[in-house]
Image (spheres, coloured by chain):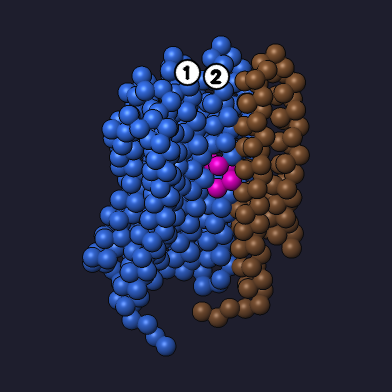
Amino acid sequence: MAIDPNILVKVAAFAGGGIAMGLGAVGAAIGEGYTASQANLAISRSPEKSGDIFKNMLVGQAVAESASIFALVIAILLLFLDASTANLLQAAAFLGAGISMGLGAIGSGVGSGFPGGQSCLGISRQPAATSKLTTNMLIGSAVCQTPAIFAMVVALILMFMDFKNAPALPTWAALLGAGFSMGLAAIGSGYGGGMAAGASCEGVSRNPDSVGNVTTIMLVGQAVSQTPSIFGLLISFILMFRVFPESTALSPAMALLAAGLCTGFGGIGPGIGNGMVAQGAVRWVARNVEHAGDLMRTMLVGQAVSQSTAIYAMVISLVLIFVV
Amino acid sequence: MAIEGADLVKAAAFLGAGLAMGLGAIGPGVGEGMVGAKACEAIGRNPKEAGLLTRTMLVGQAVSESTGIYSLVIALLLLFVV
């Protein structure tokens, strides 16, 4: 059965659009639900602050929404884009773009719900710190969006890059692998960054004077939590921009696809783990500010160790791309 | 595109190596994160014991690293030996 390339590209674009929006809706919905649940809890504790809490909840949810808005944009582009070339590569690029954006929006959506929810609870605990809490929440959840933004960048490159001159076999697998690498790796980093941001909102509400130290250690912890998604971005850039020698065999294609899957899956655990370490450190800096230095040091050591498996995964991916 | 036996075996070995290391990295990452989080909490509660707690954290993380290293070994075996 010979498939018309025009049909193949359309199929890939529609499937990619569906994947982008379907998976992209998961994270933000969970995150916003968490924010709303904590806001209800907060209002039940201090009903007289319901106005402030409600406002804060809406701001937090609006930021958490952004990951799924990126997914909506990519999905709409995929539905209405006219492909310049109709071949297997264009189809793989569209599918890869959908996978990257859909998976990539999950972590950021869930993660940015944590600071929203914790800052609502914090307002009921410490109404005097309302503006500090809102500011801290906005900083934390903005940083949580970084992995989703990386995923959008990769999706846009896949959609608009010109792959005419690349050999279709095995480059199709590289483009799919690029989508998986970025999308999967973004899950852990988004979620982990959210854990750190949530703990910082909780900490500021318990000890508003510690806000400077808490925000600093939150940002450091979040930055380290982003590393696995940066590895994912790196591998997907290599997969997209390197020229692979033409080969009709199956094994070179599978090596490229496996390289993407390896760094992608490998980034999930370390991203979440780094976030857990940062959560523990940020929470206790607020309670014990005079030992912020000790906590920062232990956090960085703990995160470095929990990073190691992401580095192994990246090494295996690089071997799959450059050696075998 | 004709797929030959040897090519198929190599393709499966590459895919297996990627999945082994990729999926194998999830558990140690989360587990070591839990250790690190509790170590930070413990240092927050009792900063005098920071040295002992950091040492215990590193030993615990090293043990929970082991499955990640198994994955790495299996992935390298699949890539270069099998």
Please give left or right for residue A24 compared with residue A202 in the image: left
Number of numbered discs on residues: 2
The answer to which of marks 2 and 1 sits earlier in the sequence is 1
Residue A207's mark?
1
Q: Check the image and report above or below for A15 versus B72.
A: below
> Dot 1 falls on which chain?
A
Taking depth in this image into account, of A225 and A87 the one nearest to the observer is A225
Magenta segment: A268-272
Specify the amino acid type for callout 2.
Arg
Taking depth in this image into account, of A165 and A131 the one nearest to the observer is A131
The answer to whether residue A291 of the structure is visible from this angle is yes
- Where does residue A192 sit, x and y in percent of width and height? 51, 39
The main secondary structure of the magenta stretch is helix
Q: Check the image and report above or below for A47 versus A158.
A: above
Specify the amino acid type for callout 1.
Asn
Taking depth in this image into account, of A13 and B45 the one nearest to the observer is B45
- Where does residue B61 sit, x and y in percent of width and height? 71, 36
- Identify residue for label 2: A287
- Where does residue A309 sit, x and y in percent of width and height? 63, 43
- Whether label 2 touches label 1, CB < 8 Å: yes
Task: Check the rendered structure and report the hue given to chain A.
Answer: blue
Q: Is residue A231 magenta?
A: no
> Dot 2 falls on which chain?
A
